[in-house]
Amino acid sequence: MIKIDEIKRAVLVSIWFMFLTFPIMVIRVNPVEHIVEWRWKNMVLVGIGSFLLSFVWNYLMKRKELGFKKVEAGEEENVVPLTRRILGEKRIYIPALVIFGIFTISFPFIFSMYQTTIMVTALIYVMLGLGLNIVVGLAGLLDLGYVAFYAVGAYAYALLNYHFGLSFWVALPIGGALGAIFGILLGFPVLRLRGDYLAIVTLGFGEIIRIILENWNEFSFGPSGIANIPRPPLFGIDLSVHGSTTYIYYIMIALCVFTIFVVNRLQDSRVGRAWIALREDEIACQAMGIDKARTKLTAFSLGATWAGMAGVVFAAKTTFVNPASFTIWESIIILCIVVLGGMGSIIGVIAGALVLILTPEYLRAFSEYRMLAFGTLLVVMMVFRPGGIIPNVRRTYKFKGVKNADKS
Amino acid sequence: MDYFLELFLGGLTRGSIYALIALGYTMVYGIIELINFAHGEIYMIGAFTALIVISVLTLMGMNAIAMLVIAGVVAVLYSCAYGYTVEKIAYKPLRNAPRLSALISAIGMSLFLQNYVLLAQTSDFLPFPNLIPEFEFMERYAHIIGSTEIVILITTTIVMILLTILIKFTRIGKAMRATSQDKTMATLVGINVNRVISVTFIVGSATAAIGGVLIASHVGMINFYVGFIAGIKAFVAAVLGGIGSIPGAVLGSFVLGWTESFATGYVSSDYEDVFAFLFLVLILIFRPAGILGRSEKNKI
């Protein structure tokens, strides 16, 4: 039952929000024509809305606290989260994987070209998310300028094609390599920086790249960008728009599978474990004989490689690049994908990319409110599930005890 | 020489506005180690509230100075209320969560507030009336510095002095310093840490609102997006000076203001931000914790 206390609280909350939103929601001004419009209806809406939401919020908060208490009491110690249990059960996940595979392959034939295009965008973000996951999720280096490498890749293909007529397949590895070089270029000066200092320098790096692209007209054609970038050809045949969208879709699927494979192998490799050690404790990690500088640089350059390749695909997909596609918001969205999905968890990052990129696309019907909803989603997700959609589980080893301990 | 002086004072004005915003960043960071991305939005909401109040009062026919004072007070009040509420909703539940989660929550809040103003008001640039009168005694120096700039400099100085007094000499200031040093220990000696954090957000929002009103009347127009850009710049300034340190934030802001001003004046205005960021990188290479930041010595 709802108690009197809660109702009292909800009333107070709704009064507070009516006060808070009063100037901005109720009054609309037009300083040019000196018109002031009063919209009292909005105030009523805010009052009722916050009254109801306050109950929902309290209920969710209580549930969250209950969860904490259970963990503290040790009741849920051995319970693996549901998603993990499903992933761990072979009988479930192999058929699921097969169905999922068939679905992905037949996707362009089931759905319209519009859906395929959206899916290609989402897949590009899956790749970007997995790349950034190396830097942020595994190595624990907060990078707010990741979009710079994406821009490097896109411009690499656009310019190489414009000046030298290089094709997509040649540009793809070059874009990746250029991304890696820029990653090292950024990595060197920031080796000594930690945490938020690193964040702001990477942010600055991203902005520098964008501003240079915008202003250096002789090199990058300025804000107007480069148009008429060719789509990838299939054995020399020029495909129709529809055909090439499908083709890019398959290229992206292949690249994503490749990325997932590589990142998965990297995670358990020597360098991957070094990244995780570096994330957990820098000093202890160095004491174990891990070269901090080299480990950080490999993280930056390997992360940037994926962004460079994703950039090449992006340029080929849109056939047009300009600096406006590479603002800081892009970096922030990629970071949100990683954190919302679950840092360090590959399947989480994929889920995060699909949710964050597809939700706004399908919310186009409510286009005005979709960014509002996006912001709310980020806050609510983080408040109630700070580990992300599918959090990463740490590798654990059970202590089995020494067999013949009591004999000695 | 006049040109140099003009750029110098222009940089100083710019710097003092960055400082007003950067203070909020650095205070919040000093206490809960969170980059408060929504701080720029608080500043924008302050400016918008002031504009709304001014428009309403203009219809009533009030004189400029009274209007400026009332608008300023209302803007500060509302910004404080927003800062307080944002902290309660988006950051308080995340006190013990991983730091990046809180950062994403802050980004979400920033997006929400931007779009909230966009939807409730407008996406266009709105003209902001300049209410600061032209002083007569300033006319001789008009080619170097305007009256608005003088007012900005004086206000900033007053705010800085008040803030220093608040932090150095009052009870709550002492509690703030204690909390930023060690939260657990502060709780043990009877400090209500949650209250201290709320107060920090309120004070930070108040300075941001003052900055918002001043810069809006200096630039002459606002829209829903001004907060984000200014927020990033102020954040750069705070990091430049050493994040978490209040004198550092002020110094960093001035350095950033001058860098931008001189780069624009002597090189090219297109690359203003590039110079600002390059300068930041240079300083951080030689002083990885910022100009006045303490470099942490870790004991193992």
Image (cartoon, coloured by chain):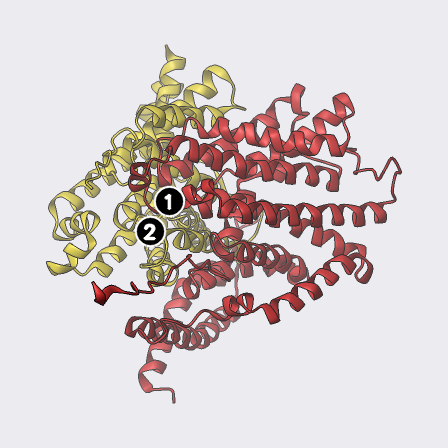
Chain colours: A red, B yellow
Quadrant where the image shows the C terminus of chain B? top left
Residue that label 2 marks = B76
Q: Is residue A259 left or right of residue B149?
A: right
- Camera-side residue of A174 and A407: A407
Question: Considering only vertical position in the picture, is B289 above or below A43?
Answer: above
Residue that label 1 marks = A277
User: Within 10 angstroms of label 2, few (less than 14), some, or many (20 or more) residues?
Assistant: many
Residue depicted at 55% across the width and 65% down the height: A87
Question: Which chain does tag 1 point to?
Answer: A
- Camera-side residue of B214 and B161: B161
Question: Considering only vertical position in the picture, is A291 above or below A349?
Answer: above
Residue B279 in the image, given as x and y percentages of width and height: 40, 24
Q: Which mark is in front, 1 or 2?
A: 1
> Is residue A204 something one can see in this rendering?
yes
The three-letter amino acid code for the residue at tag 2 is Val
Would you identify the image quadrant in which residue B145 lies?
Answer: top left
Question: Which chain does tag 2 point to?
Answer: B
Residue depicted at 25% across the width and 34% down the height: B157
Question: Considering only vertical position in the picture, is A167 above or below A246?
Answer: above
The three-letter amino acid code for the residue at tag 1 is Ala
Residue depicted at 46% across the width and 69% down the height: A81
Would you identify the image quadrant in which residue A327 lies?
Answer: top right
SS of the residue at dot 1? helix
Q: Is residue B181 left or right of residue B143?
A: left
User: Within 10 angstroms of label 1, few (less than 14), some, or many (20 or more) residues?
Assistant: many
SS of the residue at dot 2? helix
- Camera-side residue of B135 and B268: B268
Between the C-alphas of marks 1 and 2, the distance is 46 Å
Quadrant where the image shows the N terminus of chain B? top left
> Is residue B154 something one can see in this rendering?
no
Residue A264 in the image, given as x and y percentages of width and height: 55, 49
